[in-house]
Structures are given as C-alpha cells and as structure tokens.
Amino acid sequence: MSSVEVRSVTKAWGETRAVDDVSFSVAKGELVVLLGPSGCGKSTMLRMIAGLDEPTTGMIAIEGRDVAGLTGSARGVAMVFQSYALFPHLTVSDNITFGLSVRGTSKQEMAERLARTAALLDLDKLLRRKPAQLSGGQQQRVALGRALIAKAPVCLLDEPLSNLDAQLRQELRREIRALQQRLGITMIYVTHDQTEAMSMADRVILMRGGRIEQNGRPAELYERPATLFAARFIGGAPMNFLDLDDAPLGAVIAGSTGPALFAGPGRGRVLGLRPEDVAVDSANGRAAFHATVTAVEYLGGEALVSCSLGDRAIQARTRGDGAPPIGTAVGLSWDAAASHVFDAASGERLTIDTGTAATSPQLHTVTNQGQIRA
Ligand SMILES: Nc1ncnc2c1ncn2[C@@H]1O[C@H](COP(=O)(O)OP(=O)(O)OP(=O)(O)O)[C@@H](O)[C@H]1O
Ligand SMILES: [Mg+2]
C-alpha cells in the first residue's frame, strides 16, 4: 500500500489550472521531491495533500484512506512551511510542542518527546530562547522539530531551506535526509533547486505548467531525460543543444558537413550533450569535431570551456587545470552513448541507435561508401 496516493488531481482557479490531472504515489519511507520552476504548481499540490486546499477534481489517499474533507492532523501529515512560521513570543520549546499542547497531550509525554526531538536536531541548548535569538538554520531546525514531534507518518516540506546560505543548505539537506531515513518518514519535499532534488530524493517528480514532465529516480532523470525541458532542468552545467540536419550519411550537426552522428534524418531533431560528456583534445588531431576555444570559466576543481563549432557554440567540462587557453584550436569528441536526441517540435526524447555513430574516429570510421564501420 502506498503511503500517499494522488489520483488525477486538478486544482483550478477560474481558468488557471495550477495543477492539471496529476497522478503519482509515494511509498512508505520514501523521500519524493516535487521539482520545477516557479509557478508550476508545487505548493498547490503540497497544500492539497496537507488538507489546506481541496482539489477541484481527483482523489488523494493517505495510508489507503480517502482524505477528502479531513484536516491535516486527521490525515496524519505534518507540514514545514518555507517561512518557518514560528511564534515570535514563544520559546523554542513552546514552539516545538505547540501542536501537542493544543491536542491536550500530557505534560510528561510532551517533555519526553521534546527531549528526544531536541536531541535529534541538536537544539537542547537553545530551548529557552526566542526565535529572534536564533540563526536562520536554527530557526529552520525548530520548524522541522515541530513537524517531527507530531510523529505524523507523512511529512511535507515546502522549500524549507530557501532562505539559507549555500553551506547551511548543504548541511541541513544532509541532516534532513539522514533523519528521514533513520526514522523511516515518508517525505514529500518541494524545491526548485535541482541540486537539492538530485542529492536528496529517492524519486524526483519534475513538474511543468501544472503537469508532470517526468517521474523517476535521480539517475534516470539525468541519464535519460524524457523531454528537452527535463534535459535543460536537470544537471549542474546546462546541457548543450545542437540542431541537426540531413546529410547523405545520416544526421549531422546543422551548419557542418559531418561526420554523421547516426543513420536517418536529422532535420527537426536536436542533439543534447552534457558538458561533462564532451572531451576536449588540445592536440586537435584525431577528434571528429574541430572547434575553437572562445571562453573559459575556471571553477577550481573543474572548468567550463566554451567552444565554437562552426557557427554553433558548445560547452565542455575539463579539469580545472586542464582548460586550453582562449583561441586554441581543439578537437571535441564524445561517446555515442552520451548523445540525447529529441524531437524539436514536441520536445520528446527519441529512441535512436547512436551506437554506430562516427563521433569518435578512434572507434569508428565513416567509409566513403556511406556506411559506418566500427
Ligand atoms: N490562491 C490562488 N488563486 C489563484 N491562483 C493561484 C493561487 N495560488 C496559486 N495560484 C497560481 O497557481 C499557479 C501555481 O502556483 P504554486 O504556488 O503552486 O507554484 P509553485 O510551483 O509553488 O511556485 P514557487 O516555486 O514560486 O513557489 C501559479 O500560476 C499561481 O499564480
Ligand atoms: Mg511554492
């Protein structure tokens, strides 16, 4: 049985469909991230699971039970808001136990659960302080504590780290993930940050315009993006997109005379290549694609090398100390398996056998009979 099941849920405000026929399920103990750009419907989806909004149509079940009309606590969900929403006049302890005291939990049980939660989140020494006397990260942990102490089977988090600096975000996302795994909590986590999604999630649900673009494990989204949108959204440095064209031997990069990338038509198709999959060879000798370095972005351990390939631009990633200087003539190559091909009009991924491509002349040769020989 799924912990959370969302079936054909739509939320409309007048003409706007903030969430449009969305279905997914979350298994017990799983961390699922709802990922997508601003306005794609992430918060709306989460609020409907939390019971703060009701769907226009469709069904939400939690632990096998249709939860229409039930409040958040009756549904067994706890939610952490982006804004923390702490009570400024209450101490950390009172903020954490607020929900329990409202529900009339006994003093002794409350004290025990508070002690356990505070120890878990390393808040023991801060319990008497007021929120204004805490750092952003500490406030965030209090908000998290308030959700965890409820012992709700399902925990919902809406951009919980968005107000924090990069280092604190990284620390806290590790902490949240460790805690979620240790306690076996079912978690739905909303973010627009793909790094956060990829590093924390068991599964990522990528949304766009109220609909699901792709639902899969982080590695599936990275290795086999289902659409151009998914390919653009996932990954550290942006994927390169190169329009393709027809040539006698097969599909070639538009504006070039080859070599052919795969047999069949190229026009109306787009080649996607991640910078980390493009190798730069300063010797310029044997690689199939001749290019010129136009810019280098040094990032320490690695560098992003921008090149012009005919009249197209393409980025490659090298070691930080391995970037050739601007103006160098280089050879570019990549594994045929690293090519992603999409239909330009629909944006859909195409299943094309690029295994016989001629992108790496060490491995393949295009013969003048028009056949590709390994
Ligand atoms: N109460 C409302 N009334 C009308 N439209 C709304 C309401 N709440 C949200 N919307 C619209 O629904 C769409 C989805 O909003 P939502 O808050 O779910 O986006 P989001 O993915 O959480 O974005 P963000 O990353 O900016 O928080 C947006 O177009 C928004 O303007
Ligand atoms: Mg939101």
Image (spheres, rainbow, N blue to C red):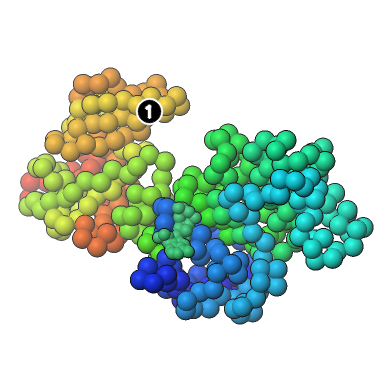
Against 66, residue 196 (above or below) is above
Under circle 1, the secondary element is strand
Left or right side of 275 for 294: left
Q: Is residue 339 left or right of residue 288?
A: right
Rendering quadrant holding ligand 1: bottom left
On screen, residue 162 above or below 111: above
Disc 1 residue crowd, few under 14, some 14–19, many 20+, Cα 10 Å: some
Above or below, 93 against 17 in this view is above
Q: In the picture, residue 281 is in which quadrant? A: top left
Identify residue for label 1: 303
Seen at 45% across and 24% down, the residue is 300
Determine which quarter of the picture holds residue 263.
bottom left
Residue situated in front as seen by the camera: 247 or 5? 5
Residue toward you, 55 or 352: 55
Report whether the residue tagged 1 is closer than 8 Å to ligand 1. Answer: no
Location of the N terminus by quadrant is bottom right
Disc 1 marks a residue whose amino acid type is: Ala
Residue 46 locus on image (x, y percent): 55, 63
**Residue 193 vs residue 279: left or right?**
right
Measuring from the top left, give residue 193's x and y in whole percent: 47, 47
Left or right: residue 371 versus residue 39 is left
| Horizontal and vertical percent position of residue 310 | 14, 35
